[in-house]
Amino acid sequence: MIRYSLSCEKAHEFEGWFSEGAEFDRQKTSGFLTCPVCGSGEVSKVLMAPSVTTARQKEGTQALAVSAAQKLAMNKLKEAIQEIRASSEDVGERFPDEARKIHYGEAEARGIIGQASPVEVKSLIEEGIEIAPLPVLPDEAN
């Protein structure tokens, strides 16, 4: 996981975690990356100090990496994602087509999940089709 310090056009600062360096660019291009304070899509990386850990600090850092509140929030997020997956039909790469069919009344209204390219995501959003990404959590990526 890669952590970036981010800022929106209104100077709200926040952090973003990405599975790889190119993921920031994909989310920004697709319109999924927005400021959590004001919702602005004009988000950019800001300069941040490097994080250097010595062998002596490493053991303590790992123990402090996640607070109890963060662990509870992560567990709630995992449960929500599991519930979404359990109550949705996985349509895989047909997601853009199925989302359109549902939106335009050509298919039964139901919850679906699947994959879409950044270009397809942008097109769906421009058509007024409400979609949302499911986050990939750290333990799912390992």
Image (cartoon, rainbow, N blue to C red):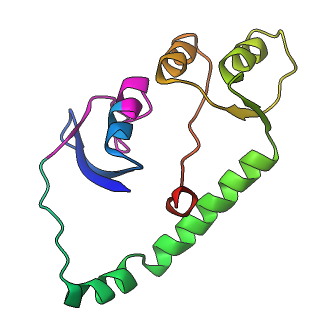
**Where does residue 4 sit, x and y in percent of width and height?**
26, 51
**Where does residue 49 sit, x and y in percent of width and height?**
11, 60
103 relative to 131, above or below: above
Tell me the residue at 28%/51% (across/down).
Answer: 14
Q: Which residues are magenta?
A: 26-46
**Where does residue 85 sit, x and y in percent of width and height?**
74, 46
Q: Quadrant of the N terminus?
A: bottom left
Is 140 left or right of 34, judged from the image as shown? right
Q: Is residue 29 magenta?
A: yes
Is 1 left or right of 123, judged from the image as shown? left
Tell me the residue at 54%/65% (across/down).
Answer: 74
Q: Is residue 141 magenta?
A: no
Based on the displayed image, in which of its 4 quarters is residue 27 positioned? Answer: top left
Based on the displayed image, in which of its 4 quarters is residue 11 positioned? Answer: top left
Q: How many marks?
A: 0
Tell me the residue at 18%/82% (across/down).
Answer: 54
130 relative to 49, above or below: above
52 relative to 54, above or below: above
Based on the displayed image, in which of its 4 quarters is residue 12 positioned? Answer: top left
Is 122 left or right of 105, judged from the image as shown? left
**Where does residue 117 sit, x and y in percent of width and height?**
53, 24
Main SS, magenta region, reads loop
- Of 91 and 131, the residue lying toward us: 91
